[in-house]
Image (cartoon, coloured by chain):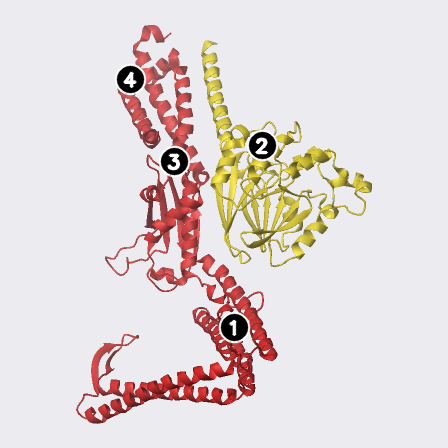
Chain colours: A red, B yellow
Amino acid sequence: MYYVLKYYKYVLIGVSVLLLAAGSLAILGRFQRGGVKGLALEYRTFRGKWSMVPLILAVLLLNLFLIPAGERLHTSAGITLNYHLASQGLNPNGTRFNQTHILSTQVLERAVERGALEGVTAADLKRTLQVRPAVQGSSASEDAYFISSQFVLEYNADRNTVGQDGEKLLTLVTQEYQKWFINEYSANTDILKLDFSPAEGQDYLDQSSFLKKTAESIGEYMRNMSSEEAAFRSSVNGETFQSMSAKAYAVSNTLVEDLEAYILENGVSVDAKQYIDRLNIANVFLDFDARKASASNENTLEAVALYADDMARIVLVPTYDTGEQFYMSQTRIGVDDFAASADSYANKKTELNEQMAKNRHVITQFSGRGGRGTDKKAETLVDQIQQELLRVAQQAKELVEEYNAQQANSYMTVVVYALEDRAKRLVVEIAALTALFAAGAQVSWFAVGGRRKGARIA
Amino acid sequence: MKRFFKIFLSLAVVAGVVAGWIVWSNRTFEETFYLMDSGKVEEPMRLILLSDLHQKEFGPGNERLLERVQALKPDAILIAGDVVNKTKTDWSYAVDLCKGLVEIAPVYYGMGNHENEALYGQDLNKEFLEEKAALLGDSPEDFRPLLQDGQSWNALLETGAQLLQNSSVTVDIKGNTIQLGGLSTNKSSFWPYSGQFVYQFAGENPSAFKILISHRPEPVMEYIPDYDIDLVVSGHNHGGIIRVPGAGGLVSEEEGLFPTYDGGWYESGGMSLLISRGLGGHGPVPRVFNKPELIVLDIE
């Protein structure tokens, strides 16, 4: 059936042209003898001029079924990328766009699974689908160079997939690709699904630092989103990524700070003795690290003093700036690196000392308290912070989802061209091919009948 | 004479073949896949929409239809009405179908005008309901006092399908909170015989994903195009019965020639409207270039 559908049109054209040519040649002699007038007279008296009608109608029927069915073997879809980086051949996150992802095994397997397609595998789909840029540029010259942001996905059925509905297949594949693309390049809200269970049962100070980190992670995530699209504002609550970031940091800087202050001021602990022991051990290790950082800092400073005069301080490299202006770039080498290392060690030492000082402060505050069990006020404060974080996370999630709905979901537009869209052309094609066959059949029949004058002409 | 007989015979053969093709094309159905995004849905879920079967069978006991529905693994099945015909109503057809579907997934059944005529003796239009106002009493949106065929209603209920007529249910589908409602009055009787229900349905439970099954799309687009309902599913217009290439559906009972709501996906404010072209038909005009349609909707 596949070959019938594929080649029917061409066979019909061939047969029609052959009949027309052979018939025309056969009546050429009669035309030369009697001219147009003689031939017209002969045709008027030709008894078999209606004999071909059943055959022509039969061919019309075949055309009505086989030409649209043949057309169904080829379906296409247009994919247009709508984000601004698409014109540079890039994905929304700036990585290189790759059109072959449309036909990736992951996308095709999901399409087969989602459509519960029977008798079709991802490999079958891969074989019958091709993707190409809608407008192809040329790399021969800068003027002809063009990066297409529109792609055409074509389905050309083969023997294995001839019974499948091409429109359905393309719908499934393009929808799966869209899902994959949005999932890959839109903002992920998983970070906003808060889970406080890891901090449950821990000492209050640990719970406090867990909540602080949670608040800061929301704030940082919103800050990153803001750098992607600072102007985006929620139509529901008027929030922006920047304002949500500020809200999250506010939880950390006020509520969590208050909790910490309360804990330290009142020496609130589930098990103060155990906590003090833990901090004492931590301080021993922190002290080792601080001493190491201090020694490294002194060593690198000594190295700078020893080699500063002997090492090249700058190297100039010829280069171009972003405005394509030539300049000599100064490159950091040698002692600059030593100096930077010394600075880094000094900072680390300070940081470790601060941590130890803080631990000592906690130890002082907890000493002698020895409290064991829960503290109502601390529990209430923890609960308040958790509720506030959940509220902020929910708002942030809604904001990201609205952003995704408006931005990511419009990353691409897909149109699957239905057979109905090609109907006008098909009607013209069927009419033209039937007319061609009718002409060929009639001319050849006239030629044959014309020769049998005794039988056919009155 | 013989010549004309031959031509007539040829034309009759052509007409016969075309008629055969129309019959054949209406014996199979195509699947249309839609994808919808919603912030209210945490876990992806799949709905299947059946509409306007008009007692049409795809294989003995709808075997082929049920097989495909099962293969597509829906999380819920929505029926947008007109499963039976108003004349020669065969309720056992609807009961058997519902029994088969309920084994695959939960079924939510909104009534169509044909069910209404079979159950109440007439479609739920304004004149009829005004005439029966005394029976309805203080609850003009509860049509149960008007039931003429309570036995069939109960038989449908016993299949396990959830019948929705000016009523709603809140259910959990794959961890998502979904509120499903059914509207089955027409434009003329929307107020006061359904409007209050739809208003309440739209207003309550804002965090739930709301689906309204309205057999007719027209009352929705006329009266509630901007209500807080996420999705409305409809049928009724049979895709315009005859699909004119390049122009869409030809005719519908409500809208006349070239109806706007002949099938497909429509957006209205924040609401989406999905209209099925249906799976069957009734009346003398067959579906042409309009294959019966089974809708698969994935919401993520």
Which residue is at a point 63% across and 33% down the rendered structure image? Answer: B84
Q: Point out the residue furthest to the top here.
A: A454
The chain letter under disc 3 is A
Q: In the image shown, does A393 or A61 lie closer to the viewer?
A: A393
On the picture, is A376 further left or further right than B8?
Answer: right
Residue beneath disc 1 = A201
Residue beneath disc 4 = A27
Same chain under badges 1 and 4? The reply is: yes
- Observer-side mark, 4 or 3, equals 3
Which residue is at a point 29% across and 11% down the rendered structure image? Answer: A451
User: Horizontal and vertical percent for residue B219?
Assistant: 66, 46
Tag 4: residue type?
Answer: Ile
Residue beneath disc 2 = B281
Which residue is at a point 69% across and 53% down the rendered structure image? Answer: B199
The chain letter under disc 4 is A
**Disc 4 vs disc 2: Cβ atoms closer than 8 Å?**
no
- Observer-side mark, 2 or 3, equals 2
Q: Residues within 10 Å of mark 2 (few under 14, many from 20)?
A: many
Q: Residues within 10 Å of mark 1 (few under 14, many from 20)?
A: few
Q: CA distance from mark 4 to mark 2?
A: 54 Å
Q: Secondary structure at mark 2?
A: loop
Residue beneath disc 3 = A71
Q: CA distance from mark 4 to mark 3?
A: 36 Å
